[in-house]
Amino acid sequence: MAGSLGDLGGLLRQAKKMQKEVAEMQNKLADKIYEGKAGGGAVVVTITGAYEFKNITINPEVVDADDVEMLEDLVAVAVKDVLQQITVDSADSMKGVTGGMGLPGMPGMPGM
């Protein structure tokens, strides 16, 4: 019985350490800037790792009043690109902290 209590204490210390590392990783990712691009860079969307929108840049050459749908598609592709980058980076960073163990509720992790 005493051995299992010691194991529980070690497990709790490990969980607290992992919790601290996860929080540090999330703070680091939140400060990171990601760019999603479409149309060879004709549309660029900039978002932080905390999903805070920063900027959108549109090359005037792709602005055509007769083809607004193309511009909308480019913006959608650029947004999807940047969100995918954040999701992949978050999942990769989380794997480094958790040793690949999925934690429900964490960005980019199984259980989301």
Image (spheres, rainbow, N blue to C red):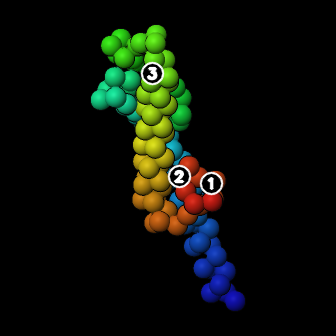
Query: Which residue extends farthest bottom?
Result: 1
The answer to which of marks 3 and 2 sits earlier in the sequence is 3
**Which of the numbered marks, if any, corresponds to residue 108?**
2
* Cα distance in 3D space between marks 3 and 1: 31 Å
Mark 2 belongs to which amino acid?
Gly
Between residues 68 and 57, which one lies in front from this camera angle? Answer: 68
Q: Which residue is drawn at 45% across and 34% down?
A: 77
Between residues 52 and 73, which one lies in front from this camera angle? Answer: 73
State which mark lies toward you, 3 or 1. 3
**Is residue 50 left or right of 88 when viewed as pictured?**
right
Mark 1 belongs to which amino acid?
Met
Q: What element carries label 3?
A: helix
Mark 3 residue crowding within 10 angstroms, few (<14) / some (14–19) / many (20+): some
Q: Quadrant of residue 70?
A: top left
Q: In which quarter of the image is residue 60?
A: top left
User: Which residue bears the numbered disc 1?
Assistant: 112
Rendering coords of residue 61 (x, y %): 33, 13
* Cα distance in 3D space between marks 3 and 2: 29 Å
**Which of the numbered marks, if any, corresponds to residue 71?**
3
* Cα distance in 3D space between marks 2 and 1: 7 Å
Tags 3 and 2 touching, CB below 8 Å? no
Mark 3 belongs to which amino acid?
Leu
Q: Is mark 2 on a helix, strand or loop?
A: loop
Question: Is residue 30 shown to the viewer in this render?
Answer: no
Mark 2 residue crowding within 10 angstroms, few (<14) / some (14–19) / many (20+): many
